[in-house]
């Protein structure tokens, strides 16, 4: 089954303790992205990657790092988490569509992070 | 800023058609209209997209006005499981770089399907 898999689904941590949220897709998609969702603010893009070893900042990249060493994986790294990074995180992937159209973004089921 | 305008909420009786409107008056010729929905706190789910012609798939129909300034998502026979927030998004055609992949989510329409 084609899917985007995030782990863990729930994570509670303390301020300053480094953590990694993993994201893996089995669709051979070139494009991957991370979003965070907060009440009243909607979904905002953190980082994205157009392909292996190609990453770039989204709208809210501060406090986050990413890497894209393999096509299928796109981990999100919080080197020193803070309470304002408490949020619901989504990973997504996509690929160029046929004939110039866009392939839809496929989303994972989310990771709910709480930083105390 | 989101380039679309949607009503914040709508109700629909179970079994009836749900018609969700969206205004995108500033849409450009190379932009598609996409619809996603988010059930509770799950990942957004793709529903349908179109450029200028009406589209239909197993989930829904998309009606785009001739001037492309608005569209309507139609769920033909709404069920309780269709209760969700529905997002209308305009997105550049592939070939415009990273921006053609990015989705800018607005606040969407919270659809409540009533038994």
Image (cartoon, coloured by chain):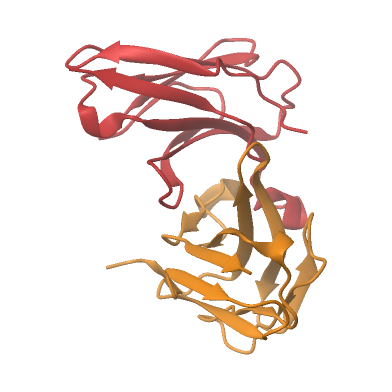
Foreground residue among B105 and B102: B105
User: Does residue A97 appear to the left or right of A80 in the view shown?
Assistant: left
Q: Is residue A88 above or below residue A77?
A: above
What's the residue at 36%, 19% (across, down)?
Answer: B74
Q: Colour of chain B?
A: red
Does residue A94 appear in this view? no
Above or below: residue B7 compared with residue B2 = above
Residue A112, x across and y down, in percent: 50, 62
Which color has been applied to chain A in this rendered view? Answer: orange
Residue at 32% of width from left, 28% of height from top? B60
For this orientation, the residue located farthest to the front is A116
> Residue at 17% of width from left, 17% of height from top?
B115
Give how far across and how far down residue B4 sits, in percent: 66, 24
- Total labels: the figure holds 0
Quick one: quadrant of the N terminus of chain A? bottom left
Confirm whether residue A116 shows in the render.
Answer: yes
């Amino acid at each position: 089954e084609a899917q985007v898999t995030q782990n863990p689904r729930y994570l509670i941590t303390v301020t300053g303790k480094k953590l990694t949220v993993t994201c893996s897709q089995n669709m051979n998609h070139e494009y991957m992205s991370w979003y965070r969702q907060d009440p009243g603010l909607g979904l905002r893009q953190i980082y994205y990657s157009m392909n292996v070893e190609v990453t770039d900042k989204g709208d809210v990249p501060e406090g986050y790092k990413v890497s894209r060493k393999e096509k299928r994986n796109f981990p999100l790294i919080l080197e020193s988490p803070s309470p304002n990074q408490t949020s619901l995180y989504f990973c997504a992937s996509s690929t160029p569509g046929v004939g110039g159209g866009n392939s839809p973004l496929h989303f994972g089921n989310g990771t709910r992070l709480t930083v105390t | 800023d989101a380039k679309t305008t949607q009503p914040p909420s709508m109700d629909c009786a179970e079994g009836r058609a749900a018609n969700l409107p969206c205004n995108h008056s500033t849409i450009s010729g190379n932009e598609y209209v996409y619809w996603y929905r988010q059930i509770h706190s799950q990942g957004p789910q793709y529903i349908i997209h179109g450029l200028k012609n009406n589209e239909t798939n197993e989930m829904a129909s998309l009606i785009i006005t001739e001037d492309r300034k608005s569209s309507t998502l139609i769920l033909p026979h709404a069920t309780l499981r269709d209760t969700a927030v529905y997002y209308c998004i305009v997105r550049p055609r592939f070939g415009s770089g990273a921006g053609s992949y990015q989705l800018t989510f607005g606040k969407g329409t919270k659809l409540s399907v009533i038994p």
